Each structure stands twice: as structure tokens, then as C-alpha cells.
Amino acid sequence: AQSVTQLDSQVPVFEEAPVELRCNYSSSVSVYLFWYVQYPNQGLQLLLKYLSGSTLVKGINGFEAEFNKSQTSFHLRKPSVHISDTAEYFCAVRGGYNKLIFGAGTRLAVHP
Amino acid sequence: AAGVIQSPRHLIKEKRETATLKCYPIPRHDTVYWYQQGPGQDPQFLISFYEKMQSDKGSIPDRFSAQQFSDYHSELNMSSLELGDSALYFCASSLEQGGDNEQFFGPGTRLTVL
């Protein structure tokens, strides 16, 4: 069965600093991975996805993630964060019948 | 571009009442998914439909039922509501036939059970 583990529940960071949000996955079949962002009281927005091909995936808002099969990881990175990046970030893996299985989420708090 | 529409956006009910949540997928999308996100929790898969047939079922209580209609919109019916049903309910749609199954999420319906 597929699952994801987000290793940090909260990540505080100062504005313009780099950030990495960690995600490890478990899957016995071909893996499709996603990062979603949820701003307060809003829905889920897709940041980026890995389906196949290049292991470095670029997404919206300057985010990128690297698929690492040997370490079963799909960490999300941004070289310089803004206050507006403060949100909840969810890593997800596609499960059977294409449903999404989400991690517990990481709350990114960007401070001035 | 058209997005997934959910209605209502907010709903307040009393315990033991019933609620119906509606989802209108992106035009031409053939698959609908329902997820439940409790306070401070990650979204949990409830149920999905492909071409109006149930395709998968997750942790959905027996008090809940859902269906997808001929126009592809879907409704989640919730009966005998409990306090623990208070959550954000997301609908997502995707194109399975000829698409890459990317799910597009609606804004959610926030259900509060008092």
C-alpha cells in the first residue's frame, strides 16, 4: 500500500531564506507524487507533480522538488521564501484507482 | 478556465440532521473524488466515481452515501450527522480517459455540526 510521511509538522523560516519541506513515500508500484499548498481557509492548489521523466520537477511560485528513488523521497524546496508562502503544504502519492493519499502536512511559517 | 464548483460553501447543521453537498466537475472530466479534512488533519479519501459508477471507496461512514449523475455532477448525502462530521469536504475531478488523471480540487464545503 502507498503512504507518505512528512517529517516536519512545522517549519519556521525567515523571509528570503531557503526552505526544504521533507516527504518520504512508500509504494510497491509505479509512484506518482504531488505537492499541494493550502492557504488558510482555502482549498488545495497543486504546486507540482512527478509522474515520470526528469527527477527534478519545477512548479509554481518558484518551488521545485526532486524525486529520489533510492531514498524514497520527494522533498520540496524554494531558494528564497516570501511572507505569502505561509501556508500548509501536503505531500501526496497516487493510490489505487487514482485516489490521493496525503501526508499529515507541514505548516510553513515565514517570519519577517 | 472553468474550475470545480462546490455548493454550498458553508453549511451549519444540528446533530442528527441530514446534509447534501454538491460538486460540479470541470467540463468533460469523467471522474469525481470526495475527500474529508477534519480540523488540523490531512484530507482523507471518501469515495470516487468514474462515468457515474462508484470506482473506489475509502473511510466513508455507512451514514454517508454518494452518487454521480448523468451530467457528471456528484452529491454527497450525509445523514444522522454527528459532531465529528464537522470538517472541510473537498471534491476533485479528473479526466481518466485520455488524460493524466490530475485531480483538480474545488474550494471545499465547510460543514459545521452543532
Image (tube, grey):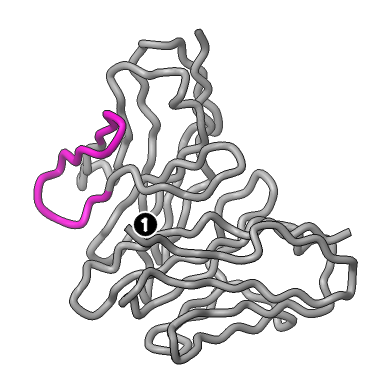
Q: Most extreme residue toward the front, as rendered?
A: B1
Where residue B62 appears, as percent x and y from the top left, is 71, 83
Q: Secondary structure at mark 1?
A: strand
Under mark 1, the amino acid is Val
Q: Quadrant of residue B38?
A: bottom right
Q: Is residue A84 above or below residue B39?
A: above
Q: Is residue B30 left or right of residue B99?
A: right
Q: Which residue is mark 1?
A: A93
Q: Of B94 and A50, which appears nearest the observer?
A: B94
| Mark 1 Cα-neighbour bin, 10 Å: few <14, some 14–19, many ≥20 | many
A6 horizontally vs B20: left or right? left
**Which of the two residues, B34 or B4, is positioned nearer the viewer here?**
B4
Image mark count: 1
x then y, percent, for residue B69: 50, 89
Q: Report the residue at 53% width, 71% height from top.
A: B23
Q: Residue at x 70, y 57 (%)?
A: B10
Q: Is residue A13 above or below residue B30?
A: above
Q: Which residues are magenta?
A: A49-64
The answer to whether B78 appears left or right of A41 in the picture is right
Q: Nearer the viewer, residue A66 or B101?
A: B101
* Chain letter behind tag 1: A
Give percent across and percent down for residue A70: 20, 44
Locate residue B12, reporting x and y percent. Answer: 81, 60
